[in-house]
Image: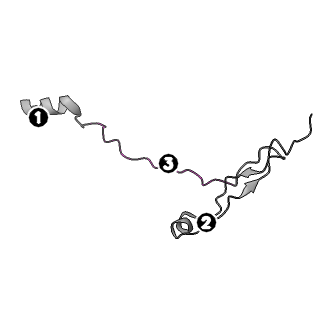
């Protein structure tokens, strides 16, 4: 059948929390917020935008790494 079958796809817990972590730690309890699967996939609300912060390369020029750095220090080579 091409009709939605509610008995096969009952309401299910959604992506939105019913209470915050602070409320839960404080002893609160709540039933999950249910969503219907009748309308198919619904995208979640807008997500926080990811931000990338470039940092200096610690392994860049002049940095001695691992065994090479240790051998250079022991032999007096810099």
Label 2 to label 1: alpha-carbon separation: 60 Å
Query: Could you tell which of marks 3 and 2 lies nearer the N-terminus?
Result: 2
Q: Main secondary structure of the magenta part?
A: loop
Q: Is residue 69 left or right of residue 41?
A: left
Q: Nearer the viewer, mark 3 or mark 2?
A: 2
- 20 vs 77, nearest the viewer: 20
- The answer to whether 17 is drawn above or below residue 74 in the figure is below
Q: Which residue is mark 3?
A: 52
Q: Which residue is mark 2?
A: 29
Query: Could you tell which of marks 2 and 1 lies nearer the N-terminus?
Result: 2
Q: Position of residue 2 (x, y in %)?
A: 92, 35
- The answer to whether 10 is drawn above or below residue 62 in the figure is below
Q: Residues within 10 Å of mark 2 (few under 14, many from 20)?
A: few
* Dot 2 and dot 1 residues touching (CB under 8 Å): no
* Residue 5 in which image quadrant: top right
> Which quadrant of the rendered structure holds the C terminus?
top left
Query: Disc number at residue 4?
Result: none
Q: Residues within 10 Å of mark 3 (few under 14, many from 20)?
A: few
Q: Magenta includes 48?
A: yes
Query: Disc number at residue 73?
Result: 1
Q: Nearer the viewer, mark 2 or mark 1?
A: 2
> Which quadrant of the rendered structure holds the N terminus?
top right
Q: Is residue 15 left or right of residue 66?
A: right
């Amino acid at each position: 059948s091409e009709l939605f079958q509610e008995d096969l796809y009952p309401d299910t817990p959604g992506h939105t929390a019913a209470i915050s972590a602070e409320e839960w730690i404080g002893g609160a309890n709540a039933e999950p917020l249910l969503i219907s699967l009748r309308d198919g996939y619904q995208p979640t609300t807008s997500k926080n935008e990811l931000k990338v912060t470039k940092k200096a390369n610690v392994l860049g020029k002049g940095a001695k790494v691992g065994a090479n750095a240790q051998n250079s220090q022991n032999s007096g080579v810099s």
